Image (tube, coloured by chain):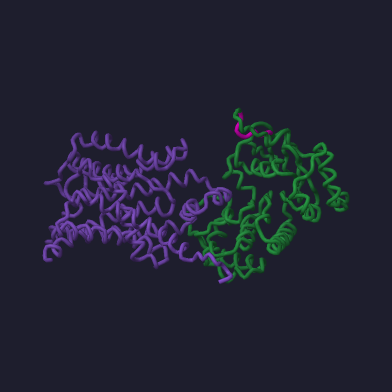
Amino acid sequence: MLQITNVEKTFNKGTINEKKALQNLNLTMNEGDFITVIGGNGAGKSTMLNMIAGVYPIDAGTITLDGVNISRWPEHKVAKYIGRVFQDPMRGTAAGMEIEENLALAYRRGKSRTLKWGVTSAEKELYHEKLKVLGLGLEDRMTSKVGLLSGGQRQALTLLMATLQQPKLLLLDEHTAALDPKTAKTVLELTEKIVEENHLTALMVTHNMKDAIRLGNRLIMMHEGHIIYDVAGEEKKNLQVADLLKKFEEASGGEFANDRMMLS
Amino acid sequence: MNAIFLAMPSAISQGVLWGIMVLGIFITYKILDIADLTVDGSFALGGCVCAMLIVQNGWNPWLALLMAAVAGMLAGAVTGILHTVFEIPAILAGILTQISLWSVNLKIMGQSNVPLLNSDTIFTGLVNAMGLKQSNAALIIGIVIAIILIVVLYWFFGTELGSALRATGNNIDMIRALGVNTKVMKVLALMLSNALVGLSGGLVCQSQKYADINMGTGAIVIGLAAIVIGDVLFGRLRSFGSKLTSAVLGSVVYFIIRAIVLQLGMDANYMKLLSAIIVALALSVPVVVQKVKAKKAYSAEGGAK
């Protein structure tokens, strides 16, 4: 359903800060795939997600989603098909607006914004039900400003917002990395639940190797802007963190994985 | 003292008519989080267009007023396109439009000011029918227009489109990821804002019975001063409708203060300085208070105390 073919992206081309972020990137995702993405700093994980989402234009190659070529689409157009949760909990929600207003904005993802009233009462019931599922008590605070919520609550809300309108593809960019371990666990459990219940196709970048092995049906490892290891099914389930580290060393020619990866 | 009282009706009516402009500035400054300097130019543009259509072309004053708003809207579109398509920083884009409008306005009028002495204005009917003074008629009509605009804006910002516009000012990354073309939103907001500014320019022109090339000079600072005065006086009110209302009331208070200090003998030329000081104070006081608080809260002993 998602087909990435020979994609390349270089930042600051022709300057001293030139950085080849993606090189010869190829990936085929099937309907219902939940892929976890790991790799060292600067491996191109986030860049890959940003390129799919149309944040920056790619330099070469093609990206197609369900047969539609979205390679050069701007971000707001790709958004019709894609739900996103960012690493920074502040980025996914509008602090100065109410919880229900945020949800209403997300409910209209990819639709044209008309002069109809922004939040209908029928919707409010839907949001109440959906918020209840999060188990954070947000259903009783629907008219509170989102700025009053904690980082974990905001991230859970963002997750709900990203999936309120069923996306063809869900992009999770280290969405638990900025949270404390306990909250991160809660948000991760919610992620599993939402992905499973809605049969979503998802790409999740993480620094936590255990999570990467435990979650999803497929795991890819990136290095220097392309995929160096792609494993699925039984083989993935039986992986150990040590295996991944070894793979990483092999593929990167004996380099050690960075500290953050070692520790997690 | 008596003289101050006598100056009040005219000050209040001016405050209301300029308050329409403040609603426009509220949209860019408070909702979109942009200081749009187009305002000085688009306010005068509204006045010039309105005056010329009435005096030279004999237009109905209400239609002339409408065209003042349309002219303002176009000026806003120019700033919007410079800012979004060509990625010129918002402040600079506004300055470019403002400066160019000075020449445009002079071209429109052919001279630096145009009097409306013998022409009918939107206030003439009320003055004749009720035997009201010009400033009282301006006050009544100004209040009616302000109320209508506040209701319309309240409605608009509650719609899907209006919500998307508010979200553009609140968290642009988020709303883009939710499929909204934020460039279109910005241009739309600048057009809407400057339409109100142009309309206000037309109203002021008709109430003072002349248009002047310099009538918009410093308008942005007056608008910001009105907004911060409104914030200080009515900031506790949280609803969107009351925020819009407090913007207009802030403008009224500004013109009352202005009338008082002028009656007390202050040179009118110092008014711009005073406006700038009000804005600078309003913006710097919270910062200073924060710093003083942080300094007081610091203790070298820390938790051991």
Quarter occupied by residue A105: bottom right
Say left or right for A66 vs B62.
Answer: right
| Chain B rendering hue | purple
Say left or right for B20 vs A240.
Answer: left
Quarter occupied by residue B156: bottom left
Residue A234 in sight here = yes
Residue B74 in sight here = no
Q: Which of B164 and A146 is in front in this view?
A: A146
Q: In this view, does B106 lie above or below A111?
A: above
Q: Which chain is green?
A: A
Report how many numbered discs are placed on residues in the image. Answer: 0
Residue drawn at (65%, 40%), measured in percent from left and top?
A51
Q: Is residue A182 inside the magenta stretch? A: no
Q: In this view, does B110 lie above or below A207?
A: above
Q: Position of residue B157 (x, y in %)?
A: 44, 57
What segment carries the magenta color? Answer: A8-13
